[in-house]
Amino acid sequence: MAPLIISISGVRGIIGESLTPAQAGEFGMAYGTFLRQTQPAEKPIKICIGRDSRPSGSMMAAALSSGLMAAGCETIDLGIVTTPGVALMVKHLSCAGGIVITASHNPIEWNGIKFIRDDGIAYPADQIKKIHELYYNKQFDLQPAQKVGQSSAESKTHAVHVDMTLQICDKTLIRSKRFKVVLDSINGAGCVVTANLLSELGCEVIHLNNRPTGFFAHTPEPTAENLAELGPEITKHHAAIGFAQDPDADRLALVDENGLYIGEEYTLALAAKYIFSKKQGPAAANLSTSRMIDDIAAQAGCKVIRTPVGEAHVANAMQANNCVIGGEGNGGIIDLRVGLVRDSLVGIALILQLLAETGKTVSQLVDEIPRYHMIKTKFPCPAEKTDQTLETVKDHFAQRAATEDIKVDTQDGIRIDLPQGWVQLRASNTEPIMRIMAESTDQETTKNLIDQIQKLIF
């Protein structure tokens, strides 16, 4: 049985096995207790709860809401909405915090809990740790009958999300192009709101997997092997671009006008290409993101701030440095004008704006960006073995760094930058695995970088 994963990124488990309604209720009580300890005593504590389309989402929402109300909090049910939609509504409704019920790209049997603070960003590690401690120790501040919270519902999330996204692009210009778009929403949370956005932008949409049932039409992670249906639909309909979302619609992968999967790394690269054509300023990206963003920023005379993996790290760096764009190489775009979490709708708007202004095709725009070869792989690794695995790799490259041109970064696992490319080894925040990622200008060199790490640990 897969264990319940409790990390800085939230909680994930398999429904009915490692994650049950009883546990969800206790997480609700823990979060409610945390907020009661950190909010003014006289201030009503409102929490909005949104979920992706998984069949277990309604059950989880009810359990979490019950736990929160037991701790004296008011809950607002947003229904099936995107993760960035929940983050927007936390601020829009002046809530003390929010909860997203999602397991992101994990299969249907999984679900999870993600906590969002009052400014619409994920909590930092020290505060998440306090919530976890309350859960582990069962230190719940439960209220008497007269003070339990009440629950209500709110249906405006999609409208607020679309409106905020339209403010960062030229709606009239994009509408004039009448782009034909193929969209794969995987029967996830992005189905309705993304169709609404594209309609507002005057696009003709061929919408695949467009019912938010949570019964995913293919393996949820938007990788090339999982999106076999998308490319042929683009060429069949002579579409300008294909977009693929993950179940909670915070990630976006791209397919060009020829039906060629160009991937998630190009989502941030193309969005940044547009932003830097309009203004200067720093960008932020995690250590696992392609060097393409560095090249694009350098062409504009700008720099990239690197952070550990996790949108909260990227968003915090963006706020601290007034970044004009940021995100992660998994297809997550953050634009501070809209919100502080990854947002596939923002990616769609910025990339359509780039297409509209340049008059170029996706493949032409991709050809203008320096090309790299990236390989991502993973292997099972229990949490208790990750430290030793990392130490083995760190020791090896620390010795080499004494005599070779090697830069070692230990912000997040270990990343080694060499003249021929870079390679990173890190533990996942959401699964009991470790990931190895490498990138260089040619596939053989990238493979050799991966092999170097694997020989050290296997």
Image (tube, rainbow, N blue to C red):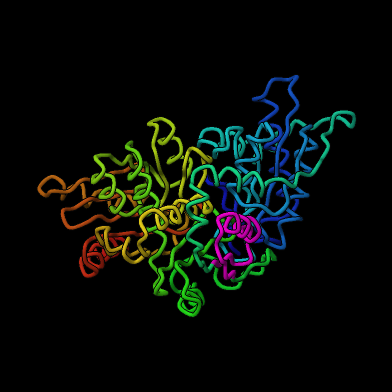
The residue located at (60%, 48%) in the rendering is 162
Task: State left or right for residue 247 relative to residue 425.
Answer: right
The residue located at (27%, 47%) in the rendering is 294
Q: Nearer the viewer, residue 443 or 230?
A: 230
Where 321 falls versus 258 (above or below)?
above
Asked if residue 426 can be seen in this view, the reply is no
Magenta stretch: residue 115 in it?
Answer: no
The residue located at (71%, 37%) in the rendering is 47
Q: Which residues are magenta?
A: 183-207
- Quadrant housing the C terminus: bottom left
Task: State left or right for residue 445 relative to residue 191.
Answer: left
Query: Where residue 17 sits: x, y (%)?
Result: 68, 61
Where 44 falls versus 84 (above or below)?
above
Task: State left or right for residue 385 relative to residue 106.
Answer: left
Task: State left or right for residue 186 relative to residue 270.
Answer: right
**Quadrant hosting residue 408:** top left
Where 33 falls versus 208 (above or below)?
above
Query: Where residue 239 sits: x, y (%)?
Result: 47, 71
The residue located at (41%, 36%) in the rendering is 318
